[in-house]
Image (cartoon, grey):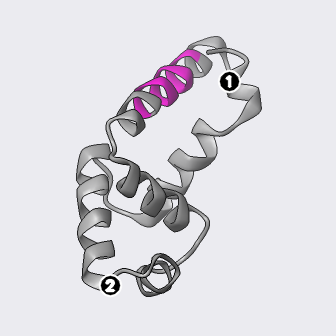
């Protein structure tokens, strides 16, 4: 990876880091649980919520982050929690 790609990657991580701060606490909890592979139904049981509530929070956070798949969500989670990248931020 050359220096331009590293800077682009760091900029992207910074953008998502800022967007993550815009999530409500409840949306952030759903984000974190989705990121580790839990399904909406499992999250609902874990948090004592209706499944539809979890799905609404999921839809809101995906819209805010401008993503369409859970794979993208997982990548954001991994990148924003990466110690190596944080040393450059």
Residue ID at (44%, 65%): 70
- CA gap, disc 2 to disc 1? 34 Å
Read off the magenta span.
Answer: 7-16
Residue ID at (55%, 76%): 38
Residue 34 drawn in magenta: no
Residue ID at (43%, 34%): 16
Residue ID at (54%, 26%): 9
Residue 15 drawn in magenta: yes
**Location of mark 2 (residue):** 51
Q: Quadrant of the N terminus?
A: top right
Q: Nearer the viewer, residue 41 or 85?
A: 41
Mark 1 Cα shell of 10 Å, populated few (<14), some (14-19), many (≥20): few
Residue 54, above or below 11: below
**Location of mark 1 (residue):** 86
x%, y% of residue 54? 33, 73
> SS for tag 2?
helix
Q: Taken as a whole, is the magenta stretch helix, strand or loop? A: helix
Residue 74, above or below 89: below
């Amino acid at each position: 990876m050359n220096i331009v790609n590293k800077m682009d990657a760091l900029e992207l991580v910074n953008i998502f880091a800022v967007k993550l701060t815009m999530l409500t606490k409840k949306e952030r909890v759903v984000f974190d649980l989705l990121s580790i592979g839990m399904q909406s139904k499992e999250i609902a049981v874990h948090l004592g919520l209706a499944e539809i509530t979890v799905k609404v929070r999921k839809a809101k956070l995906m819209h805010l982050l401008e993503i369409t798949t859970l794979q993208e969500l997982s990548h954001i989670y991994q990148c924003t929690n990466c110690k190596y990248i944080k040393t450059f931020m």
